Amino acid sequence: MPLSNQLICCVRDLGVVDQDLSLVSHVSHVTSVCFFRIRELRLVRRSLTTDNAHVLVRALIHSRLDYCNGVFAGLPAGVFNRFQSVLRATAQLVLGLPGLAPVMSAIRDMLHWLSYPQRVTFKLCLPIGGGWRGGLEGGAVA
């Protein structure tokens, strides 16, 4: 098999970077999917406990926000604001807060979530810190 075919077979498109490398289409897609999931979860929220709602939010929304979020390091604050609005909406959903209630202190104190820029920094620093301590226990960061 020629070398060029081997290289093509190994290339994987993660679906994050668009043609002009601005990530605008990816950010728009991720936020729209997350808000769609939030609307779906609002329909069943009354039948869920707070812990169950928290688990569903982590599985359906946080996993989508954290996928390849290391590429957002150094991007303008507007990118982070869009993802942060998703985190605020999910916190309101989990805690059952009204729409205009202040959420940031509840995100930090009650849910123990990092803000989105802090999540990106944490994800970038985690492998470095694990290597410094002698390796990550429990596997690598996805």
Image (spheres, grey):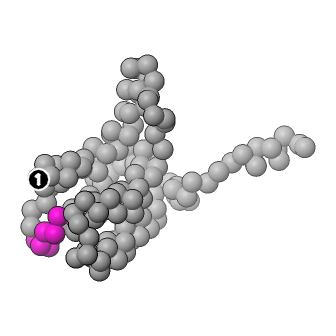
- On the question of residue 74 being in view, the answer is no
**Among all residues in the image, which is located at the extreme bottom?**
43
Dominant secondary structure (helix, strand or loop) of the stretch shown in magenta: loop
Look at the numbered disc 1 and give the secondary structure of its residue.
helix
Q: Which residues are magenta?
A: 95-100
The residue drawn where x is 39% and y is 59% is 59
When the figure is inspected, residue 132 is found, relative to residue 121, above or below; the finding is above
Q: What percent of the width, then of the height, locates residue 83?
A: 31, 59
Tell me the quarter of the picture where residue 23 sits. Answer: bottom left
Q: What percent of the width, then of the height, locates residue 86?
A: 29, 63
The residue drawn where x is 32% and y is 59% is 55
When the figure is inspected, residue 137 is found, relative to residue 116, above or below; the finding is above
Q: What percent of the width, then of the height, locates residue 104?
A: 14, 55
* Residue 27 sits inside the magenta stretch: no
**Left or right of residue 128, residue 115 in this image:** left
Q: Amino acid at mark 1?
A: Ser
Residue picked out by circle 1 = 105
* Residue 98 sits inside the magenta stretch: yes
